[in-house]
Image (spheres, rainbow, N blue to C red):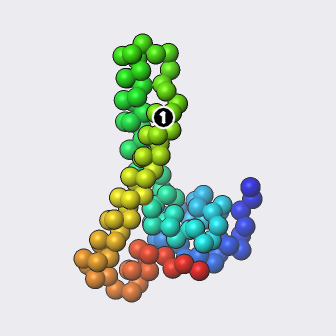
Amino acid sequence: MQANPSTTQNTPRVADAPADNWADRYAPESVRPYLRLARLDRPIGFWLLLLPCWWSVGLAEVALHQPYPNPWLLTLFALGALAMRAAGCATTTTSTAITTRAPRARRAALFPPAR
């Protein structure tokens, strides 16, 4: 899948996000504000939630004398980590915007405008 350079130029970028991330390159322009709100263009939080979950599944399977972890549990924990990361980021961004009564420029950085 090739990136469309014309669509990456139209959407304003969040200041602390990397310039050439996967969300700006491949996601449809209508979905980008939601991906940025959930901070899915910066996956470190997802990995910090996911890896301890996968580690615990692996340890439980070792305790049950299973040769490998259950793929269903790995997928379930991956979806849960993704949902928790997105919900936490959206909640934090919304509460910051409400409690600080952010000026228009800051609010634009928190909530990128949809096109």
Q: Would you identify the image quadrant in which residue 47 lies?
A: top left
> Which of these two is toward me, 4 or 19?
4
Q: Amino acid at mark 1?
A: Leu
The answer, for residue 44, to whether it is visible in the render is: no
At a point 49% along the width and 27% down the height, the residue shown is 70
The answer, for residue 51, to whether it is visible in the render is: yes
At a point 34% along the width and 65% down the height, the residue shown is 91
Seen from this angle, which residue lies furthest right? 2
Question: Does residue 68 appear left or right of residue 25 in this picture?
Answer: left
* In the image, residue 103 above or below residue 3: below
For the N terminus, the quadrant is bottom right
Q: Residues within 10 Å of mark 1 (few under 14, many from 20)?
A: some
Element type where label 1 sits in the image: helix
> Which of these two is toward me, 19 or 86?
86
Residue 85 coordinates in the image, percent (x, y): 40, 54
Q: Would you identify the image quadrant in which residue 109 lies?
A: bottom left
Residue 15 coordinates in the image, percent (x, y): 46, 71
At a point 38% along the width and 36% down the height, the residue shown is 53
- For label 1, the residue is 74
* In the image, residue 44 above or below residue 55: below
Residue 37 coordinates in the image, percent (x, y): 45, 67
* In the image, residue 22 above or below residue 49: below
For the C terminus, the quadrant is bottom right
Seen from this angle, which residue lies furthest left? 99
Residue 40 coordinates in the image, percent (x, y): 49, 57
